[in-house]
Image (cartoon, rainbow, N blue to C red):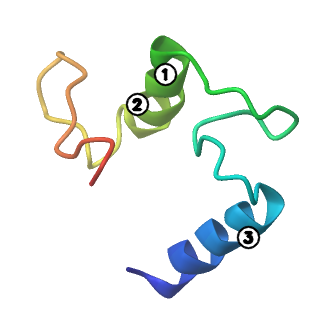
Amino acid sequence: MHPELSSILLAWRDKRPSGQFVACDDDSLDALGRHEAEARFWQPLRGTAWSLPDRSHRLKIGFHT
């Protein structure tokens, strides 16, 4: 794991010691809905080198990559 990602995840765990969801708003411990979580992941990657060259808006990577 990249050291920067490790640092971010450790800070997240310190902020939420009860093991709440990773995909939630900063001011909430409730999980994001499936569509909201997907939108927050996929939208910033569209049109980047991670997108496939067709117009399907599919990406070369998945959420767990």
Residues at badges 1 and 3 in contact (C-beta under 8 Å)?
A: no
Q: What residue sits right under mark 3 in the picture? A: 11
**Residue 10 image point, x, y percent:** 65, 73
Q: Residue at x 51, y 86 (%)?
A: 3
Secondary-structure class at tag 2: helix
Secondary-structure class at tag 1: helix
Alpha-carbon distance for marks 3 and 2? Answer: 23 Å
Q: Quadrant of the N terminus?
A: bottom left
Decide which of 50, 63 is in the foreground and name it.
63
Type of the residue with mark 3:
Ala
Type of the residue with mark 1:
Ala
Secondary-structure class at tag 3: helix
Residue 16, relative to residue 11: is it above or below? above
To which quarter of the image does residue 12 belong? bottom right
Task: Specify which label sits upstream in the sequence, 1 or 3.
Answer: 3
In this view, the residue farthest toward the right is 27
**Residue 42 image point, x, y percent:** 40, 30
Q: Residue at x 17, y 16 (%)?
A: 56
In this view, the residue farthest toward the front is 18
Q: Residue at x 60, y 40 (%)?
A: 21
Q: How many marks?
A: 3
Residue 43, relative to residue 17: is it above or below? above
Q: What residue sits right under mark 2 in the picture? A: 42
Q: What residue sits right under mark 1 in the picture? A: 39
Alpha-carbon distance for marks 1 and 3? Answer: 24 Å
Q: Residue at x 67, y 34 (%)?
A: 24
Question: Is 3 left or right of 1, judged from the image as shown?
Answer: right
Q: Quadrant of the C terminus?
A: bottom left
Residue 65, relative to residue 2: is it above or below? above
In front: mark 1 or mark 3?
Answer: 3
Residues at badges 1 and 2 in contact (C-beta under 8 Å)?
A: yes
